[in-house]
Image (cartoon, grey):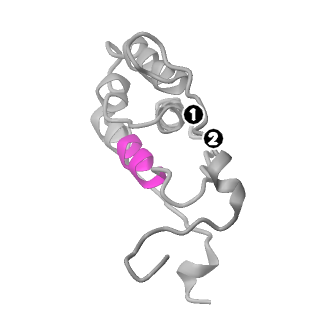
Amino acid sequence: MDDELNILPISSHIKSITPVPVNEDPEGLSESERDLKNLKQELSEDFPVGPLIKKCCTLDQGKAVVTFLDAILDKSLRSTVALLAARGRGKSAALGLAVAGAIAAGYLKESLVLESCIDSLGM
């Protein structure tokens, strides 16, 4: 960056960089956006999943909420669900939506949330 905050090229190859094409449908949606839209439509009538899936921003987040709710609504209480992803992927939002679904279905009596990141322990 120069003194006028202009980005300077690192090498001469920067001139040949072109944007990666995104496959969009006629509505302007990418494949994952289209899949999320289809998931929302498929589950729109199911309670408590439908209203919660409408709040999801990505397909992965939607799949996570569905997986959490499958485990919660199973009633056998014999399953464990773990969600691992990089920072900023919506894990907390997905878990919050799943807890809301458990409360709406009347199944939430006990809840345990663990974070295994060493950074969060101050180490």
Q: Is residue 80 left or right of residue 47?
A: right
Residue at the spot x=50%, y=24% of the render?
30
Is 86 or 84 nearer to us in this picture? 86
Mark 1 Cα-neighbour bin, 10 Å: few <14, some 14–19, many ≥20: few
At numbered mark 1, what does the secondary structure look like: helix, strand or loop?
loop
Q: How far from the left and from the top, in percent, is residue 90? A: 45, 50
Mark 2 Cα-neighbour bin, 10 Å: few <14, some 14–19, many ≥20: few
Q: How far from the left and from the top, in percent, is residue 99? A: 37, 45
Q: Is residue 95 magenta?
A: yes
Q: Which residue is mark 1?
A: 76
Q: Are marks 1 and 2 in contact (CB under 8 Å)?
A: yes
Name above or below for residue 26 compared with residue 86.
above
Residue at the spot x=53%, y=79% of the render?
120
Give the magenta part as a residue range. Answer: 91-99
Residue type at mark 2 is Ser
Q: Is residue 5 left or right of residue 117?
A: left
Residue at the spot x=70%, y=60% of the render?
12
Is 8 or 79 nearer to us in this picture? 8
Q: Is residue 106 magenta?
A: no
Q: Nearer the viewer, mark 1 or mark 2?
A: 2
Q: How far from the left and from the top, in percent, is residue 77? A: 56, 40
Q: Which residue is mark 2?
A: 79
At numbered mark 2, what does the secondary structure look like: helix, strand or loop?
loop
Q: Main secondary structure of the magenta part?
A: helix
Q: Is residue 77 left or right of residue 42?
A: right
Residue type at mark 1 is Ser
Mark 1 to mark 2 CA distance (whole Å) = 8 Å
Q: How far from the left and from the top, in percent, is residue 95? A: 44, 48
